[in-house]
Amino acid sequence: MKKDTLTITKPGMVCAVALLCCLLWGSAFPSIKIGYRLFEIAESDSMSQLLFAGYRFSLAGIMVIVIGSFMSGRILCPKCSSWSMVIRLGAVQTIFQYVFFYMGLAHTTGVKSSIITASNVFFAIFLSAVVFREKITPGKMTGCIIGFAGVVLINLTGAGIDLNLSFAGEGAIMLSAFASALSSVLIKRYSAKEDTFTLCGYQFLFGGVVLSVIGLAGGGRVSGFTAASAILLAYMGLISAVAYSLWSLLLSCNPVGKVAIFGFSNPMFGVILSALLLGEKNQAFTIRGVTALFLVCVGICMVNKSQSA
């Protein structure tokens, strides 16, 4: 059995690292919008978006491999028996998740997408209960419901939520959320057999290359390369490299449910950073925004308290 040299299990450190990951992921929302503008990608051009994502994740994989190799003093390379894990993880976490995400986003609203995506926390907790026999206590479930209520609240508009559903739209987003949750369970299982940074780096590289091929085959194009757009692309690669590697490290040495609950803070950070970077202040700095943040925090605390008990 393989053991990571670095472990993070103290509650305070788990909280700090998990929130850092979610802050980075939250910054991806405005970064993607800015990237579409800089790289001249239309919001309806799904193939160019997949190509853009492919560039981002390929770069993230290279970053993780280089950084991990420098930290360990050797070139990271999966064992022969680990390549099947790399391919399965890359297929679920990077390829399936983002293909379904972009397909669904083209057929539904951003509000419903944010709410449905947050359901990956529930999927992760239920899957961990099935695979790892983690108990779903009343306190844990109550915390999940309260945290999810915060996500719904921050995404509500004056007209409420349109309840019309379709497989190509909401169904695809739901499949994307399930793929995200399943990747958490896979990294928990696979990290017992292979170095976490090796898994992350090579699954990103594999997934990024496949997404790039799909985008190019579908007629996608990414143009407008300048110093500013190159820096943004590098930052987005760094988001994935740092956040997912740290998140995977947390999953390797903590119960899945204890880590997954912090995912409710992703849309919160996304709304706040969008307000600061894109001028979208209609949701973040309001009574509703503060209440939603409070509900998310209460939900996180309840799940962690239940896990500790």
Image (cartoon, helix red, strand yellow):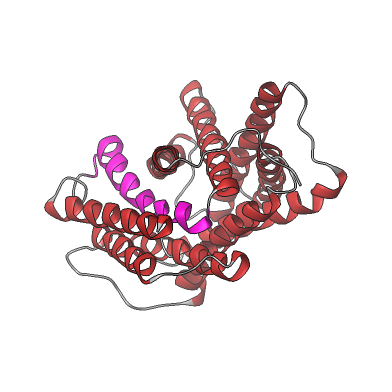
Of residues 222 and 158, the one nearer the viewer is 158
Of residues 37 and 75, the one nearer the viewer is 75
Magenta residue check for 261: yes
Rendering quarter of residue 75:
top right
Question: In this view, which residue lies farthest toward the right?
Answer: 80
Magenta residue check for 244: no
Q: Is residue 87 above or below residue 19?
A: below
Question: In this view, which residue lies farthest toward the front?
Answer: 309
Of residues 218 and 73, the one nearer the viewer is 73
Q: Residue at x 21, y 47 (%)?
A: 284
Rendering quarter of residue 28:
top left
Q: Which residues are magenta?
A: 255-280
Q: Is residue 243 above or below residue 286?
A: above
> Can residue 278 be seen from the camera position used here?
yes
> Can residue 103 be seen from the camera position used here?
no
User: x%, y% of residue 136?
Assistant: 45, 69
Position of residue 205 in the picture relative to residue 118 (left or right): right
User: x%, y% of residue 56?
Assistant: 58, 39
User: x%, y% of residue 272?
Assistant: 27, 43
User: x%, y% of residue 254?
Assistant: 53, 50
